[in-house]
Image (cartoon, coloured by chain):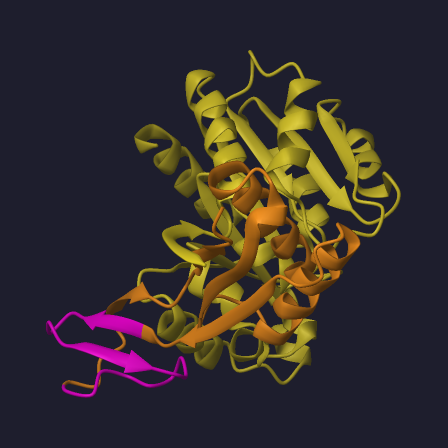
Chain colours: A yellow, B orange
Amino acid sequence: MVKKTVEISAREHNDLIAAENRKHFFDHGIFAVNIIGSPGCGKTSILEYTVNHFNETFAVIVGDVKTALDSDRIIHAGHSNAYAIETGGGCHLTAQMIKEKVGQMETAAIDYLFIENVGNLVCPSTFDLGEHLKIAVLSIPEGDEKVRKYPALFLRAAVVLINKVDLLGFMDYDIERVKEDCRAHNSKVKIFETSVKTGQGLDAFFDYLREQRRYF
Amino acid sequence: MHEFALANDIIETVSARVAPDLSKVSGINIDVGAFSGVVADSLDFGLRTILADKNFPDVKINITEVPTVARCECGNDYSLKEIFESCSVCHSFNRKLISGMDVIIESVELVEE
């Protein structure tokens, strides 16, 4: 028996394709974000709001186990540049799925790509898609212990949106503790309190995206 | 169950980078970081299932769980098992995690010709 030391990342197969995606995005001037959160936390609602309030050119890819319901919502909100990926059972998007979908899209004229991952706080966390920014979305009705329960995501997310803050007065939710928990996982995390009902925090979030795109 | 997808990627990588002929592989040694987000038992199950399906049921899988090491803003490196373990010297959470976030194919054992 010969032991061959290799020290290769187990994620290399996905990461090499993610690197290709990142190069494609860079070559086309596209700033890509990977949005991860529970089912129902408001990921698609934030993107619907984005359609009407983010005055930039962008495309949207939405991943779900089944159906194109969410990309249809984006299209019905008035944005035709939206695409669905049906994983058919898979619990997360992979770099290969993004590569195939981007290959079918017209990307020459866009500056941003929003990728909404499958609603799940676990599996999508560790699969690089080639994005420039990993964004976690929390929401008030989910309860304030989600950061502690799902560390893999909050160790890796550069941005956290605490969404549906218009419901804060109606629920027991210790938002300061949630922010502290986020910072314990990632001391450099950028946190926005957001609501698509009132628009709170979303202009600041859009400005942050513009600023990040300038330096990517 | 993202461990199954990762197991598939590991077999693809071993085949592409180390041993195109998987019949030459007798063992795969893998390090799973404490904060990798991967459950070692599930990864082990995924690897065994895929290898059996490819008719290589005798490949030995050896998974070692490795701790996470943080480098604090004060310069102290410390090992941690839980996120809420702060720096053992200054108790700060301002740190960079320098290992234990990844899953690494440490080595591959090959049968001699």
- In-front residue for pair A181/B38: B38
- Whether B4 is drawn above or below A63: the answer is below
Characterize the magenta stretch by its predominant secondary structure.
loop
| Residue at x 33% of width, y 29% of height | A214
Count of picture labels: 0
Is residue A101 in sight in this rendering?
yes
Q: Residue furthest front?
A: B113
Quadrant location, the N terminus of chain A: bottom left
Quadrant location, the C terminus of chain A: top left
Residue B8 place in picture, x, y as percent: 65, 50
When asked about the image quadrant of residue B44, the answer is bottom right
Is B72 in the magenta?
Answer: yes
Residue B45 place in picture, x, y as percent: 69, 69
- In-front residue for pair B71/A178: B71
- In-front residue for pair A11/A35: A11
When asked about the image quadrant of residue A49, the answer is top right
Residue range (magenta): B69-89
| Residue at x 80% of width, y 42% of height | A70
Q: Residue furthest left?
A: B75
When asked about the image quadrant of residue A170, the answer is bottom right
- Whether B23 is drawn above or below A40: the answer is above
Is residue A200 in sight in this rendering?
no
| Residue at x 66% of width, y 63% of height | B58
- Whether B97 is drawn above or below A85: the answer is below
Residue A74 place in picture, x, y as percent: 76, 35
Is B55 in the magenta?
Answer: no
- Whether A74 is drawn above or below B90: the answer is above
Horizontal side of residue B52 vs A179, given as left or right = right
Residue B96 place in picture, x, y as percent: 26, 65
